[in-house]
Image (cartoon, rainbow, N blue to C red):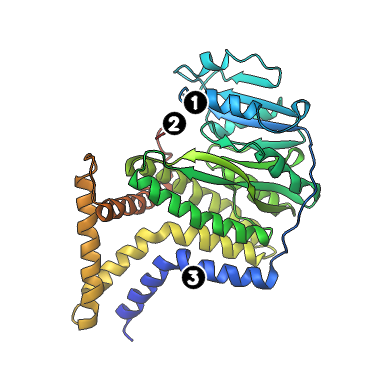
Amino acid sequence: MTSLTIIFWLSVAGIIYPYAIYPFLLRLLVIVKGKKPVEYPPITPMVSVLIPAYNEEKVIEEKIITTLAIDYPREKLEVIVISDQSTDNTDEILSRFNDPRLKVIHLEKRSGKNQALSRAMEVAGGEIIVFTDANAIFDSNAIRELVRPFHDRTIGSVVGQLVYQNPKGTLIANLEKLYWSYDNLLKNWEGQLHTLLGANGSIFAIRRELWEPVDDMVHEDFIIPTRIINRGFSNIYRPSAQVREIASSTPEQEYSRRSRIVWKGWVAMGRTLGWFLHPPRWIMIFEIISRKAVKRLIWFFGGTLFISNILLLTHPWYIYPFVAQILFLIAATGGRLQRDRNKKNKLCYYAYSIMALIGANLVGFLDYLRGRKPEGIWEVQRP
């Protein structure tokens, strides 16, 4: 076997590893070391729901109404909205509410999501802190379900399930829903190991005493639960606690969001991987490398696959994967050209969407290498 052949097949493995090989290995690990599901008794601790908001006039009213109406004891619930210098009608909408359970904080200058959360924690009175986004609508029992596992003192954070909706029937939203079905499956299995990697910014909760401020260089829904695991507590998945969001409508929206996530993800990996090396905690190392690093290097494996395939065309068998790659690139180009049309070819548009995500992974990685922070403290991208 030549070195080019080895590179080709390692590239194939690198591409399919996060989506096929890692789930298979993770499932085997769950069978061997996973903890049996526990039916936790109902509890109703004091809960603070934190909602950072910047220019959320389209969604903030529904978010506040549904959160205040949620099935949870009124005297045990407070909702804190942090308006990060919104320039639309967000502040005016918030001023219409007259409920003692609602606190609104207006930041004096644009500070970013993580600074907004730190400001909210200064006034939060809950034993349990629930983090959520302005466009994420809780199911009526979501908070009750989210807090139940805190009956176990070894559990430090709990992650709920994000359910994407696609009322417009857009193709990119269908692709995003498919991705999140895969992601929720991995969360479920990692949660059975009590080492769920990261959280979901739309719905997760922590014990108040485990809070530590987070800087703007990382995403809070990865760094906060990972810190908690490092302190010896468990991070678990609670799929019965659900929120619903409308999925992204265009590849361009998803590209912008994903490149920012990737950039901050590499920063977070650089910080957190070392926490689990001394002494080694092999499950966490396995999850971080498999779930975060390898998946975000798909652009690299795709490039080495394409180049090695070209150099292997003297072997007849390698013509077939090369033709498949060319057809994929042609389809992606076609999807890009038809992005503004009402009627789209599904295969072409899916190929374009996948290429946009691959490009976002590359751009995010280059931003990380250059040490360049993506422009904008915090911008809203809604369907």
- For the N terminus, which image quadrant? bottom left
Distance CA(mark 3)–CA(mark 2):
35 Å
Question: Is 144 situated above or below 358?
Answer: above
Q: Quadrant of residue 324?
A: bottom left
**Res. 116 in view:** no
Marks 3 & 2, CB-CB < 8 Å contact: no
Question: Is 74 situated above or below 317?
Answer: above
Query: Which residue is label 1 attached to?
Result: 54
- Which residue does the image show at 33% across and 41% down from the upper left? 250
Question: Is 81 situated above or below 363?
Answer: above
Per the image, label 3 sits on a secondary structure element best described as helix
First reached walking from the N terminus: tag 1 or tag 2: 1
Marks 1 & 3, CB-CB < 8 Å contact: no
Q: Position of residue 57 (x, y in %)?
A: 47, 22
Q: Position of residue 178 (x, y in %)?
A: 44, 54
Q: Indicate the amino acid at tag 1.
A: Tyr
Question: Is 271 situated above or below 252?
Answer: below
Query: Which residue is label 2 attached to?
Result: 380
**In this orientation, which residue lies closer to the viewer: 261 or 101?**
101
**In this orientation, which residue lies closer to the viewer: 1 or 124?**
124
Q: In which quarter of the image is residue 285?
A: bottom right
Q: In this view, does 117 lie to the left or right of 365?
A: right
Which residue ends up furthest to the bottom in the rendered image? Answer: 1
Q: Indicate the amino acid at tag 3.
A: Ile
- Which residue does the image show at 53% across and 16% down from the upper left? 93
Marks 1 & 2, CB-CB < 8 Å contact: yes
First reached walking from the N terminus: tag 1 or tag 3: 3
- For the C terminus, which image quadrant? top left
Query: Which residue is label 3 attached to?
Result: 21
Distance CA(mark 1)–CA(mark 3):
39 Å
- Which residue does the image show at 78% across and 26% down from the upper left? 75
- Which residue does the image show at 47% across and 16% down from the upper left? 89
